[in-house]
Image: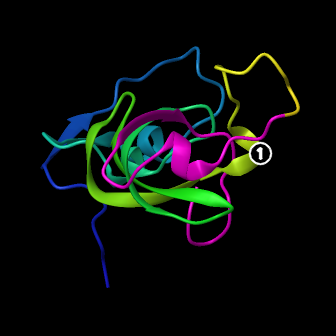
Amino acid sequence: HVYACLLGTMEIVRAENDDAMEDESDEQQLGFGCCVRSSKPPATNQVLKVGQKVVGRISRITPQNALVEIKLAEGVGPLRFYFEGAIRLEDIRSFSSKSEETVPLLGDCFRPGDLVACRVISMGDARRY
């Protein structure tokens, strides 16, 4: 079975003999190479990375975290399927209070339906970033 990871046109090109190359690849031995051109980016672009900026919508709030449906990613644009992320209580800081000891309530910071701009700080568990 052959499975494709890209949809596009395949172009077979003649490999040029390059005497500077000491290591002969399969393309040089066979005398041709293969190049795939696709109008769509590969599916690997849809995988989020640590440090990437994302935009999402708050879907649910629990006492420990706010769950986010990630809709957009930096460098990718709109995602085909949304990813689920979590904003943890310990990652939220209150900027209205002078005291560092006050812990804000998630219900005071977010409401379901809010749009948030975030940065992926870890890959999380199997269900969310």
| In the image: residue 65, left or right of residue 40 | right
Q: Is 123 part of what is drawn in magenta?
A: yes
Give the percent coordinates (x, y) of residue 31: 35, 40
Q: Is residue 29 above or below residue 77?
A: below
Give the percent coordinates (x, y) of residue 25: 54, 41
Q: Nearer the viewer, residue 91 or 93?
A: 93
The quadrant in which the N terminus is found is bottom left
| In the image: residue 24, left or right of residue 100 | left
Q: Is 96 part of what is drawn in magenta?
A: no
| In the image: residue 124, left or right of residue 21 | right
Give the percent coordinates (x, y) of residue 10: 16, 48
Q: Quadrant of residue 99?
A: top right
- Judged from this view, the residue extending furthest toward the right is 101
Q: Which residues are magenta?
A: 102-129
What residue is shown at x 37% (from left), y 45% (from top)? Answer: 56
Would you name the residue on which mark 1 appears?
A: 90
What residue is shown at x 54% (from left), y 17% (from top)? Answer: 19
What residue is shown at x 34% (from left), y 44% (from top)? Answer: 114
Q: Main secondary structure of the magenta part?
A: loop
- Name the colour scheme: rainbow
